[in-house]
Image (tube, grey):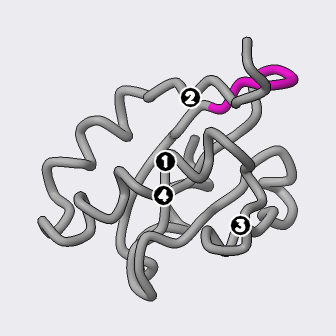
Amino acid sequence: MNGKNEVEYGDGFLKDLKRLPKEAVKKLGILIEYLRDDAFDPRLHTKPLGPPLADKYSFRITRDWRVGFMFTGQSRIKLLIADHRSKFYERIKRL
């Protein structure tokens, strides 16, 4: 491996992609490349989620859209969900 993170797409995340606005999907492709290079790249606005979600993180697609993810290994990331911020936190609590 060349030092990049391996990104896995969860089933919920893939379903969510169909509901995202087209401009968010376009931007997401670029952001996933940043995530592969560095999960804490400042352009992602990555945040660790608080208890009881201490093993999960989020990054912004836009001001209103978020992606939830977790580390599944040293250089492995699983994308869990993508949703509007008004629904994001309630949904990720259920995972």
Q: Amino acid at mark 1?
A: Ile
Q: Badge 2: few (under 14), some or many (20 or more) residues near its Cα, within 10 Å? A: some
The amino acid type found where label 2 is placed reads Val
Given the image, on which type of amino acid does mark 4 rest? Answer: Leu
Residues tagged 4 and 1 counted as in contact (Cβ below 8 A): yes
Q: CA distance from mark 4 to mark 1?
A: 4 Å
> Which residue corresponds to the image point at 66% horizontal and 32% vertical from the top-left?
77
Where is residue 5? Give x, y as percent. 69, 30
Work out whether 42 lies above or below 79: below
Q: Read off the residue under disc 4.
A: 31
The kind of secondary structure element at disc 2 is strand
Please state if 38 lies on the left or on the right of 28 as rendered.
right
Which residue carries the number 1 mark? 32
Which residue matches tag 3?
Answer: 46
Marks 2 and 1, the one that precedes in the sequence: 2
Q: Quadrant of residue 65?
A: bottom left
x and y percent of residue 57 in the render?
72, 55
Q: Are marks 2 and 1 in contact (CB under 8 Å)?
A: yes
Tell me the amino acid under the disc marked 3: Thr
Question: Is the Cβ of the residue at disc 2 closer than 8 Å to that at disc 4?
Answer: no
Depth order, front residue of 90/78: 78
**Dominant secondary structure of the residues highlighted in magenta in the image:** strand
Vertical relation: 67 (above or below) 79: below
Placement of the C terminus among the 4 image quadrants: top right
- Looking at marks 3 and 4 on the same chain, the residue that comes earlier in the sequence is marked by 4
Where's residue 17, x and y in %?
24, 48
